[in-house]
Amino acid sequence: MPDSQYFHSNGKLLLSGEYFVLDGAVALAIPTKFGQSLFVRQNSEKQISWRSLDEKNEKWFFGRFDLEHLESIESNDLEIAENLVKIFSYLKAIKPTLFEIGWDFQTRLEFPKNWGLGTSSTFIANLAKWANIDAYELLANSFGGSGYDIACAFNNQPLFFSQKSEARSITLLDWAPIFSQNIYFIYLEKKKNSREGIQSYRNKGLAPSSLIDEISDISNTLVDTNSQTTFCAAIEKHEEIISTYLGIEKVKSLYFSDFFGSIKSLGAWGGDFVMAVSEKNEKETKAYFNKKGYSTILSWNEMVL
């Protein structure tokens, strides 16, 4: 193994299939131009050091760990340090030779970590690349989730993702809507914990197969149509299904009831980004969201890899 190594993984957005992807629905996901890098080098100490930088190159986490016992020596965030210890312990169990020498790890995000574009998934993907193990297995033994975000981390184009029992399906797509110039991604200025959203969904029990099929059909419609009207009708139907099933108000009803177009939550409802499909030009669209107090508005080309 070389003395130093560099890895990079893509961020993600889930355009359709949120929550229901956990029960086998076909989800439509896109890798983003924003990702996370990992730089690893050997050190001569019997320690692991970790440093995480944000998009401004400012340190937001640091920690040192005893190599032999994989215990935290010091850190600025106990919860993150404990998660790292668990992940290191899992890696050591399957790749013990990795921990015969000390390592310095440094990560760097290309997006603000509260954006929800995959701080955890890009971290898992990069670490799996370094350890040369299955990233989906590492995800299952750490943060959990469907794995669509790992698929985005490793692939450079939109994709269909589904996971039924042990059968995972990933279909890469040569796709961008012909009206993509009318699609925008708006950050809602608050972070939503995906694991909390997943738990709320799980509390409902196994989703009816009819709803899983409906969500899968919507994912296919979004890719197959060349009509903005059909696309908007599909995402509005998707919003109605999630809203009714979870008993959560739709984001358009809550914040954007007077918007000239369609709006869909992305990922865990209640935070992170929404997707807006506008009937007006870029200037008018951005002015609308600015007036509502939202300043982070990215076009399709600015967001999608």
Image: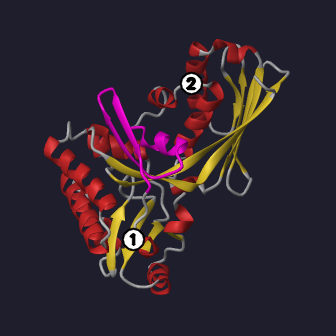
Q: Residue at left 34%, top 64%?
A: 264
Q: Which residues are magenta?
A: 146-174
Q: Nearer the viewer, residue 302 or 169?
A: 169
| 151 drawn magenta | yes
Q: Is residue 186 above or below residue 163?
A: below
Q: Amino acid at mark 1?
A: Ala
Quarter of the rendering containing residue 41: top right
Give whichever of discs 2 and 1 has the lower sequence position: 2
Q: Which residue is mark 1?
A: 276
**Residue 301, horizontal then vertical, whole percent:** 53, 67
Residue that sits furthest to the right in the current view: 44
**Residue 163, horizontal then vertical, whole percent:** 33, 35
Query: Which of the two discs, 2 and 1, sits closer to the camera?
Result: 2
Q: Secondary structure at mark 1?
A: strand
Q: Residue at left 25%, top 56%?
A: 218
Q: Amino acid at mark 2?
A: Ile
**Residue 84 shows in this picture:** yes
Q: Residue at left 57%, top 42%?
A: 122
Position of residue 115 in the picture relative to residue 288 (left or right): right
**Residue 249 shows in this picture:** no
Quarter of the rendering containing residue 8: top right
Q: Is residue 297 above or below residue 143?
A: below
| 11 drawn magenta | no
Query: Marks 2 and 1, Cα distance to the nearest angstrom?
Result: 38 Å
Quarter of the rendering containing residue 233: bottom left
**Residue 35, horizontal then vertical, whole percent:** 60, 50
Q: Which residue is mark 2?
A: 133
Q: Is residue 184 above or below residue 39?
A: below
